[in-house]
Image (tube, rainbow, N blue to C red):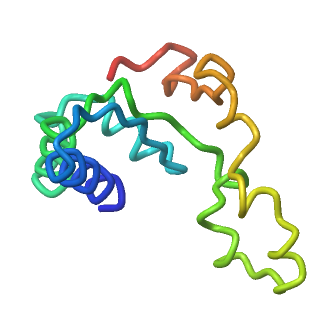
Amino acid sequence: MGALLSGRLCDKVSKTLKFEKSCFFHTDSSIVYHWIQGEPARFKPFVKNRVGEIHRLTEPLKWNHCPGRENSADILSRGISVKELKSSELWWHGPPWLRQNEQSWPKIEKPKVNNQDLEL
């Protein structure tokens, strides 16, 4: 649902401001990442419908994986003091790799079954 909300938000903002969207998306869920990379028809209705809408609103190749410990949005839910939050580079600036070119961003491996790549 968070991924769908991101897609809807990007679409709405780009239409409202009348500019061609060029958005990148990040999820810390490897399952959601692989769903988005897959074909919606392969999934049960709830996931199928949401992944289908994500595909209509965004390009699957614009989706990336953010390792959970590097997700600045999760800092508050993990528990942090105000003092630590004030000086948190991750909170104020995001993960360091986000300021680098796309080739430096974390990559997620294809899932494997019996040591073979699983086709998505």
Where in the figure is residue 90, as x and y percent of width and height? 76, 57
Along the viewing direction, whichever of 33 and 23 lies nearer the viewer? 23
Answer with the quarter of the image where residue 37 lies.
top left
Residue depicted at x 83% and y 65%: 88
Residue depicted at x 48% and y 48%: 27
Along the viewing direction, whichever of 34 and 95 lies nearer the viewer? 95
Q: Is residue 40 left or right of residue 94?
A: left
Q: Is residue 32 left or right of residue 79?
A: left
Q: Quadrant of the N terminus?
A: bottom left
Q: Is residue 56 left or right of residue 105?
A: left
Where in the figure is residue 44, as x and y percent of width and height? 15, 49
Along the viewing direction, whichever of 37 and 56 lies nearer the viewer? 56
Q: Is residue 55 shown above or below 7?
A: above
Along the viewing direction, whichever of 39 and 54 lies nearer the viewer? 54
Q: Is residue 102 shown above or below 90?
A: above
Residue depicted at x 13% and y 41%: 52
Q: Is residue 96 shown above or below 120?
A: below
Residue depicted at x 14% and y 47%: 15
Q: Is residue 44 shown above or below 79?
A: above
Q: Quadrant of the C terminus?
A: top left
Where in the figure is residue 24, as x and y percent of width and height? 42, 36
